[in-house]
């Protein structure tokens, strides 16, 4: 299990989750529309969940059904940032 950042983080980017994460596994580059959790580094402590003011962070298996693609979005950012960014933009265009 890992934690996933979902749609309500888009264009919000409050950094409370980063400050709370003891594993330092939440990242974004300047200009990114949201933060991303590295599934390989997440220690499943859920420390990032409570401080998130937009309720964007869920355990993978508890992620709302309409956000399931954010499992891929989060992990993709660590392999191909441009592809992850395109997925976020695509999601926003559809919603």
Image (cartoon, rainbow, N blue to C red):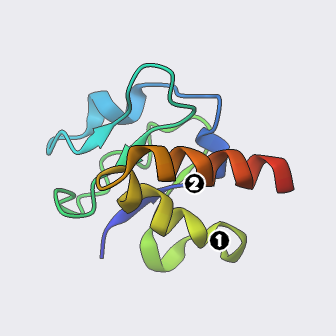
Q: Residue at x 31, y 68 (%)?
A: 2
Q: Residue at x 44, y 45 (%)?
A: 50
Q: Are marks 2 and 1 in contact (CB under 8 Å)?
A: yes
Q: Residue at label 1?
A: 64
Is residue 95 visible in this depiction of the protein?
Answer: no
Left/right of residue 84 with respect to residue 25 in the rendered view: right
Q: Residue at x 37, y 52 (%)?
A: 80
Specify the quadrant of the image occupied by residue 87. Answer: bottom right
Residue 67: x %, y % from top left: 65, 66
- SS class, disc 1: loop
Whether residue 25 is situated above or below residue 61 in the rendered picture: above
Q: Which mark is residue 6?
A: 2
Dot 2 or dot 1, earlier in sequence: 2
- SS class, disc 2: loop
Left/right of residue 13 with respect to residue 11 in the rendered view: left
Residue 69: x %, y % from top left: 59, 69
Q: CA distance from mark 2 to mark 1?
A: 9 Å
Specify the quadrant of the image occupied by residue 41. Answer: bottom left
Whether residue 1 is situated above or below residue 5 in the rendered picture: below
Left/right of residue 17 with respect to residue 41 in the rendered view: right
């Amino acid at each position: 299990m890992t934690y996933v950042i979902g749609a309500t983080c888009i264009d919000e980017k409050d950094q409370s989750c980063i400050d709370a994460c003891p594993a330092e596994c939440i990242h974004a580059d300047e200009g990114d529309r949201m933060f991303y959790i590295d599934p390989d580094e997440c220690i499943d402590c859920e420390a990032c969940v409570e401080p998130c003011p937009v309720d964007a962070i869920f355990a993978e298996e508890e992620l709302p059904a309409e956000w399931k693609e954010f499992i891929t979005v989060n992990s993709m950012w660590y392999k191909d940032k441009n592809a992850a960014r395109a997925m976020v933009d695509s999601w926003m265009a559809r919603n």
